[in-house]
Amino acid sequence: MTDDPTPIKRNFLYEAIDADIASGQVQGKIITRFPPEPNGYLHIGHTKAICINFGIAQHYNGQTHLRMDDTNPVKEEQEYIDAIQDDIRWLGFTWDRLCFASDYFEQLYDWAIVLIQKGHAYVDDQTVDQIRANRGNLTEPGTASPWRDRPIEESLDLFARMKAGEFPDGSRVLRAKINMADPNLVMRDPVLYRILHATHPRTGDTWCIYPMYDWAHGQSDWIEGITHSMCDISFEIHRPLYDWCINRLAEENAYPPGITYKTRQMEFARGNITTLITSKRKLLQLVTANHVTGWDDPRMPTLRGMRRRGYPAMAIRRFWEEAGVAKRENLIEFAKLESLIREELNRTVQRRMAILDPLKVIITNYPEDQIEQMSVINNPEDETAGRRDVPFSRELFIERSDFMEDPPRKFFRLGPGKEVRLRSAYWVTCTDVIKDDQGNVTELHCTYDPDTKGGKTPPDGRKVKGTLHWVSAAHALDAEVRIYDPLFLTENPEQVEEGKIFLDNLNPDSAKTLKNVKVEPALADTQSGDRFQFERTGYFCTDSDSTADKLVFNRTATLRDTWAKVQKQPNQQKQKQKKKQQQRSASPHKKD
């Protein structure tokens, strides 16, 4: 079910399942399911349900089914069916059965006929708008359809003709006959079937009536022997209908004899993450309005986007495991996810040297034709990662930000007359600063100490505090680096002021591209999806746009959470000002 399980945290779902086992309600295997509708790509919100359903089944040595809820051919495509399977595999999970709601269309139709025959359902000629208008509200009961008491034989005939394709879309529906005054609006004669003349990705044009989710879901669970149907809290209001459908068929002996199990639906709170939106409708707006480059844009909360950005699957799983499972929704800091991403990448990825904003350095006393191979550790957190050779020559590139012509006292990097260590190479001292006609620094001249090879301390025992990364100019590869920050400026982008929409919260600087990046030659053979730590800079992933002629890297995360710090600075400044004002108010006025 999973190759690398995360630790199991017990919660109220486990307690309920333990009670079901103890009472004899469940006598065989625990069987769970993950039932996505294939009308889009999975996002990080889906992964909570994935981790819960697969994790619980694994804990009890049970099974998990992946079931595509393909009941709306207007929105569903094979592309999404394939992508969902690929994303779940990437997360590290394997399902025991791949199922489709469309596998059960014939059985669902036959069971619908049973409901009609027993007086539990009827064909309604009202339009969807009329049904909605007559449903009532939380304080007023609904109005019964004029077709509610339609003769059973007439409903059976019309339902068969609906299936045969005699009626246009929206002209008739099949509704359950429950209670138009029920306090739960979901129970006020819900629609079970609608007419849709659309080609289905699996069944083609065989069907032109399709079951609604509330009808297909519970019965699909029953068919597959699902013992526990776990879903997010938004489905809690639908649970009475879920149970009603199963109970009616059981009472009417529609199920095969001798089968006594009953699927139990349980709900858990969604996990909302600051700065992220997971509404499919709103994500679609971002894509269609070109606010992002596509569903796999590295700023998107889709698994495709996070995967392209370089997020490790294990960090996402650990995030939901540590967030826990509750019945009450909460808002989780995105910084928590990034912290786990950094932790996982720090432990697993190799280091490389890359210069994002190059400044040339010429070591004037280094032999012009000499090239040395410096042995550099690949990952200090992983002894098995070994070392690599990095070429060193007279001309190098360093980060422009690692030099200041007039540095402050605690600037421990390079400046006129200052000495620093070049990672795993030599100690160098800046002797001259070359500028262009506009006064811009274009080049540095330095000298090196041959006794410091490998970065070791020289015989005289002097010390330096700064260590810089570098790339040999003669061997550097050109690359493009894409820098990403949060797509939205606010913690909860869906909460907007009156008269505004969520798009007003977009961050105009969420994506930047650096074109003149220089990287070490060890990155020549990198493949899409490879992850690295660019030393002293951050974590990066090779993008799918990358080629041998044009290397492209996405920044996965900074080495530290600089974004949260930047966002908090205005508030901290306000707090300081407020405190000063309070202190002034509290202090006695000075006399003249």
Image (cartoon, helix red, strand yellow):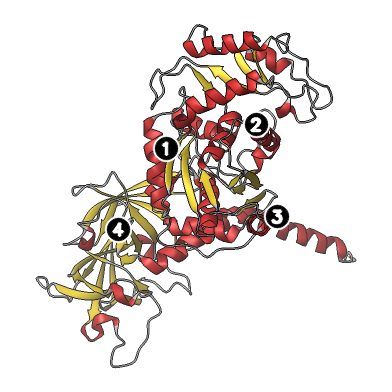
Q: Quadrant of residue 254?
A: top right
Q: Is residue 64 left or right of residue 399?
A: right
**Residue pointed to by mark 3:** 574
Q: In the rendered structure, which disc, 3 or 1, sits on the residue that comes first in sequence?
A: 1
Give the CA distance from mark 1 to mark 4: 33 Å
CB under 8 Å between callouts 1 and 2? no
Q: Is residue 135 above or below residue 235?
A: above
Q: Is residue 485 above or below residue 291?
A: below
| Viewer-nearest residue: 500 or 64 | 64
Give the CA distance from mark 3 to mark 1: 38 Å
Give the CA distance from mark 3 to mark 4: 37 Å
**Residue pointed to by mark 1:** 295
Q: Position of residue 526 (x, y in %)?
A: 24, 56
Q: Is residue 278 above or below residue 27?
A: above
Specify the quadrant that holds the N terminus: bottom left
Q: Which numbered dot is residue 245? A: 2
Task: Check disc 4 and give the amino acid type.
Answer: Pro
Q: Quick one: SS at disc 1?
A: loop
Nearest to viewer (mark 2 / mark 3): 2
Q: Position of residue 148 (x, y in %)?
A: 72, 13
CB under 8 Å between callouts 1 and 4? no
Q: Quick one: SS at disc 3?
A: helix
Q: Quadrant of residue 3?
A: bottom left
Residue 529 visible (yes or no): yes
Task: Check disc 2 and give the amino acid type.
Answer: Cys
Q: Position of residue 309 (x, y in %)?
A: 39, 50
Q: In the rendered structure, which disc, 3 or 4, sits on the residue that comes first in sequence?
A: 4
Q: Quick one: SS at disc 2?
A: helix
**Residue pointed to by mark 4:** 358
Q: Quick one: SS at disc 4?
A: strand
Give the CA distance from mark 1 to mark 2: 36 Å
Give the CA distance from mark 2 to mark 3: 57 Å
